[in-house]
Image: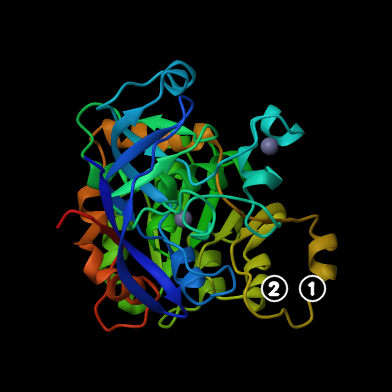
Amino acid sequence: MTRRSRAAVMTGLRTTEIREFDLPEIGADAGWLRVEVNGICSSDWNMYNNDKPGPRILGHEMVGRIEQLGSIAAYRWGVSEGDLVALEEYLPCGHCEYCRAGEIRSCIATDQRFSGGVRYGSTPLKVAPALWGGYSQYVYMPPRAIIHRVPDGVPPRIAAMCLPVGNGFQWTYYDCGAGPGKIVVIQGPGQQGLGCALAARIAGADMIIVSGLSTDAERFELAKLFGADHTIAVDKDDLLETVADLTKGRMADIVIDTSGLGPNNINPSLRLLRKRGVMATLSRKGSARDFDAELLIGQQLTLKGLRGHSYDAVEMALRAMASRRYPFERMSTHVMGLDQVDHALRMVGGQLKERSIHVSIDPWI
Ligand SMILES: [Zn+2]
Ligand SMILES: [Zn+2]
């Protein structure tokens, strides 16, 4: 009997249609994942607003059970049919200088901004066998797939947050060097900002401050449970003055901007740093007015662009989940079915009144 997969296909700008696909035969070096749940990330909303690549199945934060596994894939990946796994969104080449150095996120073969780059959640249907996104019952696992085993006792709905929380470990610990003695300011209390707070806490930072808006009250409460010492609503209190007060004028060693406020946020954020501080940002939309190079050079600051994570950072997130010391279940606020993908994307994109922290899709409900 041929197996089929229901999937939510992005057919045009902010348009989704349910379609069914046959699962073709695959080679001995590949596999099929039966998706249990797929997490939605803010980048999905950006992709939903870009129809250039053509029809595709979005979703790149997949957790599921291995349904079918070729003999070569079983040998190479060290997993068995039935195992619960989380997939990386990256499908790296494995042999370029970035891959060889363990920096799979930098591999050009898996960067969708370059022609021919393939990764989950952004590869069009026209690339066989079409099932490259997590808003689907089954997902193709090509020879390049990168797999994490989900530790015992971590439910799929929690494991589905391992990539955004992994970003927190990557950015805070690996990219910005959080650790003992460091004061860390995290802008934006979403899933990635909460991941940054957790990583800073586990790394042993001295003080962790999370900023957002007064509408983020629930997220602030969670930020404290994940490790924040202080939270600041920037529409009520001045961020610069409050950071100066809390740190007794010492200011921050690290500022991580996950807010998406745009390049205009760079100058004010750099002012939160003490001399030799490091700022890293995700804010790419729009353009910066009068970038303050004098401040950057005068204070000997470092400014970095954030994008993605290493394998290790995701393993750290999965271990934090397995420790049961943090309330990840409160971070997962919504689970919806394939028929509600459009609604779920709009919710994550901030287009609806209803608030969420982490939303995931269960393709079987
Ligand atoms: Zn993502
Ligand atoms: Zn590579």
Q: Which residue is mark 2?
A: 267
34 horizontally vs 25: left or right: left
The reply, left or right, for residue 249 in relation to residue 346 is right
Q: Position of residue 100 (x, y in %)?
A: 70, 27
Query: Foreground: 226 or 277?
Result: 226
Horizontal side of 336 relative to 307 (left or right) equals: left
Q: Is mark 1 within 8 Å of ligand 1?
A: no
Q: Amino acid at mark 1?
A: Asp
Q: Residue at x 43, y 83 (%)?
A: 235
Q: Are marks 1 and 2 in contact (CB under 8 Å)?
A: yes
Q: Quadrant of residue 90?
A: top right
How far apart marks 1 and 2 lie (CA) works out to 6 Å
Q: Is residue 3 visible?
A: yes
Q: Position of residue 330 (x, y in %)?
A: 21, 54
Q: Is label 2 in a helix, a strand or a loop?
A: helix
Q: Is residue 23 left or right of residue 307?
A: left
In the image shown, does 291 or 205 lie closer to the viewer?
Answer: 291
**Ligand 2 picture quarter:** top right
- Between 221 and 143, the one nearer to me in the picture: 143
195 or 273: which is nearer to us? 195
Tag 1 residue? 292
Which colouring convention does the figure follow? Answer: rainbow
Q: Within 10 Å of the Cα at label 2, are there few (<14), some (14-19), or many (20+) other Cα atoms?
A: some
Residue type at mark 2? Asn
Q: Quadrant of the C terminus?
A: bottom left
Who's the residue at 56% across and 49% down the image? 308
Density class for disc 1 (Cα within 10 Å; few <14, some 14-19, many ≥20) is some
Q: Position of residue 297 (x, y in %)?
A: 85, 61
